[in-house]
Structure formats: structure tokens, C-alpha cells
Image (cartoon, rainbow, N blue to C red):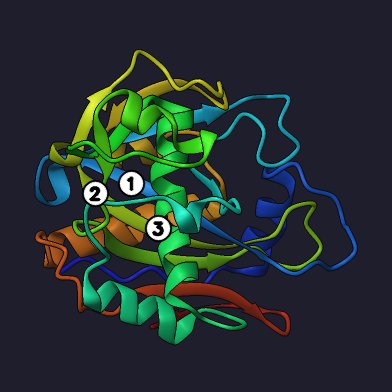
């Protein structure tokens, strides 16, 4: 059985602060965010899509990450062909900070789909007519794709420690390559460069944010023990309490 990841050490926390390009900043409230791990294949041998963040970015410049980003105002209103799996929605609602709502939980998941299109040119969903009211989602009806939430599976959650120039309450989801309905040559935002399909061992050798390495370790464990990504299984939650960075299960 694969060994479970340990909590981050103080050295790793300081290394994360250096690698993500952050400087000590006034504390700020974490913003809802979502990240999507697209899997091509089953089990621990599956490949994942990762890309390098542009070197001009203020947050984690030049590091390899999964597609994702903060929730935008329009995300909660985007039309979809289905809803989150009930187990996934329940876990989000049970553990979201602040006032949890179904719209907010939905927006976190939809942000991962929008960001994956913007950063990687992949439109996750089904071939259906589904008009959208906001320009951020216009590419989906233009290509005949309705965003789909039902096959998203929750993998992990992590909150950026205080003192960074950016802070996110990030939820990590997984989807299968089969869920991609349309593929462009590249994402229109240009935020991710040097896109690659990688196995977990290959990804571990890249220049990564510390938390991304931890999520890769979590994913390796999950895919080994639960290759079907059962939606009701607990997921790890990395967060700072006092001066200790913890790994809880939620």
C-alpha cells in the first residue's frame, strides 16, 4: 500500500513561499478557487495535463501546475447539462468556509472547467446546445458544448498560508479525458505554457509548488487504492493552524 503524505514541514512552508514568488503581505481572506486534474487512462499509470505558469506571473512564476484559478462572478450562473454528484456537492457544502450555498459550490467546480478552457483549450462537457449569457462562457456554445459537472471527482483541498501575495481556498477535482468534448490548439489566455501529458513519476521531477507535489502524492495514493475515484471517499485538506501546516481528512 502506498504511504500517505505527511504534513508540510517548516522548511517546506518556507520553500513554498520562495517558489511561489510571494513576499510577506498583509493577511487577506482566501478566495474560492478550483483546479482540474485531467486524467488520460486509469489507475496510477494515468497521464495528467500540466503546464508551466508564465515567468511574468506574480504568483508561482515558472512553476508547473494543473489548470485552474479563482472563481469569477459569472461562474455560478453558467448553464450545465447536469449537476455535481450528490456526494461531491455535500462535501463542498459541509466544509466551505463562510456561507455555503449550492450556487457557490457549483461555481467552484465550474471555475475549473472555464479555466481549463482558457489555459489549455480543452472544453469539458457534452455535445449539446446550451446557450450561455456571459462572454466568459461564450466558447462553449460556439463549439456546441454544454459544460458537465456530473463526472467531476473531488481529490483534495488546500488553503494558501497567510502572508502571500495571493491566497486561495482551492478545491482540486479530477475528470477523465473522455469528458473532453472539444479541443483547441491552445488556451486563449496564454497563462499556461509548455503543456504536457505526464505520468505522476514524470510530474514529480518538474519544478513544482510544494502543495502541487503534495497533491501529486495524494493522487498517486488515491489512484492506487481507489482507481475509480469513488465520490464518497474522504479527501485530504491542507491548511495552516497556528504555526503548523496540517493535513486533515474531510
Query: Residue 100's spot in the image, x, y percent?
Result: 51, 81
Q: Residue at x 31, y 65 (%)?
A: 154
Q: Is residue 220 left or right of residue 31?
A: left
Q: In front: 205, or 95? A: 95
**Separation of disc 1 and disc 3 at Cα?**
12 Å
Contact flag, marks 1 and 3 (Cβ < 8 Å): no
Contact flag, marks 2 and 3 (Cβ < 8 Å): no
- Residues packed near mark 1 inside 10 Å, few (<14), some (14 to 19) or many (20 plus): many
Classify mark 2: helix, strand or loop: strand
**Separation of disc 2 and disc 3 at Cα?**
11 Å
Q: On the image, numbered disc 3 is attached to which residue? A: 109
Q: Quarter holding the C terminus?
A: bottom left
Query: Residue 136's spot in the image, x, y percent?
Result: 52, 36
Vertical arrangement, residue 34 with respect to residue 234, above or below: above
Q: Is any part of residue 169 visible from this angle? A: yes
Vertical arrangement, residue 35 with respect to residue 236, above or below: above
Q: On the image, numbered disc 2 is attached to which residue? A: 175
Q: Residue at x 63, y 25 (%)?
A: 54
Q: Quarter holding the N terminus?
A: bottom left
Q: Is residue 162 left or right of residue 104?
A: right
Question: Of marks 1 and 3, which one's residue comes earlier in the chain?
Answer: 1
Q: Residue furthest top?
A: 185
Residue 221 picture quarter: bottom left
Q: On the image, numbered disc 1 is attached to which residue? A: 37
Q: Is residue 149 left or right of residue 51?
A: left
Question: Of marks 2 and 3, which one's residue comes earlier in the chain?
Answer: 3
Which dot, 1 or 3, sits closer to the camera? 3
Q: Residue at x 42, y 81 (%)?
A: 93
Classify mark 3: helix, strand or loop: helix
Amino acid at each position: 500500500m502506498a504511504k500517505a503524505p505527511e504534513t508540510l514541514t517548516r522548511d517546506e512552508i518556507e520553500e513554498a513561499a520562495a517558489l511561489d514568488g510571494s513576499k510577506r503581505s498583509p493577511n487577506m481572506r482566501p478566495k474560492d478557487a478550483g483546479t482540474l486534474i485531467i486524467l488520460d487512462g486509469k489507475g496510477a499509470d494515468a497521464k495528467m495535463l500540466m503546464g508551466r505558469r508564465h515567468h511574468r506571473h506574480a504568483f508561482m512564476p515558472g512553476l508547473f501546475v494543473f489548470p485552474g484559478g479563482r472563481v469569477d462572478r459569472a461562474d455560478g450562473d453558467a448553464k450545465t447539462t447536469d449537476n455535481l454528484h450528490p456526494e461531491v456537492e455535500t462535501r463542498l457544502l459541509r466544509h466551505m468556509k463562510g456561507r455555503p450555498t449550492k450556487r457557490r459550490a457549483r461555481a467552484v467546480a465550474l471555475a475549473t472547467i472555464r479555466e481549463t478552457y482558457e489555459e489549455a483549450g480543452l472544453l469539458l462537457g457534452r455535445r449539446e446546445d446550451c446557450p450561455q449569457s456571459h462572454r466568459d462562457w461564450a466558447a462553449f456554445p460556439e463549439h456546441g458544448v454544454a459544460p458537465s459537472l456530473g463526472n467531476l471527482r473531488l481529490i483534495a483541498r488546500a488553503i494558501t498560508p497567510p502572508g502571500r501575495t495571493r491566497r486561495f481556498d482551492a478545491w482540486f477535482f479530477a475528470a477523465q479525458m473522455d469528458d473532453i468534448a472539444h479541443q483547441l490548439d491552445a488556451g486563449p489566455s496564454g497563462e499556461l505554457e509548455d503543456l504536457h501529458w505526464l505520468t505522476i513519476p514524470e510530474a514529480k521531477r518538474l519544478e513544482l509548488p510544494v502543495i502541487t507535489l503534495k497533491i501529486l502524492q495524494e493522487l498517486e495514493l488515491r489512484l492506487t487504492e481507489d482507481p475509480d475515484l469513488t465520490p464518497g471517499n474522504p479527501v485530504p485538506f491542507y491548511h495552516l493552524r497556528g504555526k503548523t501546516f496540517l493535513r486533515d481528512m474531510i
